[in-house]
Amino acid sequence: MRPKTAYHDDLGDLFAEHAETSPYNAWIDRPALLDLAGDVKERRVLDVGCGAGHHAAGFMARGAEVVGVDGSATLLRHARARLGDGVELWLHDLEQPLDFLADASFDDVVCALMIHHIDNRRGLLSELLRVLRPSGRLLLSTTHPTADWRHFGGSYHSSEWVDLDLGGSGASIHYQRATLELLLGELLGAGFALDRLVEPRPVPGFREIDRERYERLSTAPTFLALRLVKPGA
């Protein structure tokens, strides 16, 4: 049975294309996580929910060794085409333990815009803590609670599952809303320490492409990006 939290078949192909140029992905999320990561040269990085490999490519360009995991064979096909044959990629249901990865085997874990798709977040976060080395970092992005509140309405405190249209395509992605209190409670409860939290805006280069949209996306948050650390020597 294919993981329900992954983007399969036509939706996977659509998402791979969307993530290439969407300002939310290309000009907000990816730059924010790369900025939080800083110097990753010769660091071993696990990209959880690696999708079509866009984040992995950015980290590899900075000299990191990247291992990718995703539940979608469709997206891993795109990742392979983007990253080449030398990169270790795993097809795996992220609701299940990462039992093919050794304890304390990564310097960093990237978890980009996927934690809100997971039912068993406690289990996944426990696994991410396990595979990180002491003082290793979790670089995580997710939807901003106020952006979801503005878009879907209702109570800010809602933790309902919602469907968001994917770039006007008619297709949608399914995920769970979460307040800042809930998100940080889960992350800190899993054993991570918060190092930095940012509410990323579009990087200036996007202004040259679409000034009107740049100005609009700069007025209200869409994502949260966090750098967390596994305590240790």
Image (cartoon, helix red, strand yellow):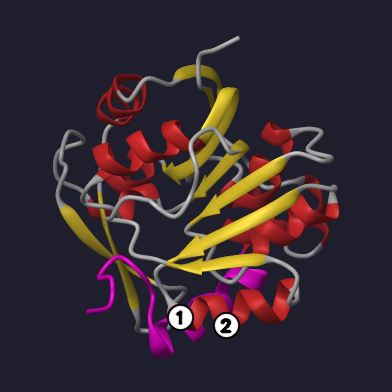
Quarter of the image holding residue 22? bottom right
Residue at 35% over, 57% down: 94
Asked if one can make out residue 198 in the rendered structure from this viewpoint, the answer is no
Q: Which residues are magenta?
A: 1-22
Q: Is residue 209 above or below residue 102?
A: below
Give the numbered dot on residue 77. 2
Give percent across and percent down for residue 112. Answer: 51, 50
Q: Is residue 174 visible?
A: yes
Quadrant holding the N terminus:
bottom left
The residue tagged with tag 1: helix, strand or loop? helix
* Residue contact at pointers 2 and 1, CB within 8 angstroms: yes
User: In the visual, does 70 lie left or right of 88?
Assistant: left
User: Could you give the CA–CA distance between mark 2 and mark 1, rounded to whole angstroms?
Assistant: 6 Å
In the displayed structure image, the side of residue 118 where residue 31 appears, left or right: right
Q: In the rendered structure, which amino acid carries the disc numbered 2?
A: Arg
Q: Which mark is residue 124?
A: none
Compared with 44, 118 (above or below) is below
Q: Residue at x 33, y 74 (%)?
A: 172
Q: Nearer the viewer, residue 229 or 102?
A: 102
Residue 223 percent across, percent down from the top left:
48, 43
- The residue beneath circle 1 is 73
The amino acid marked with disc number 1 is Ala
The total number of labels drawn is 2
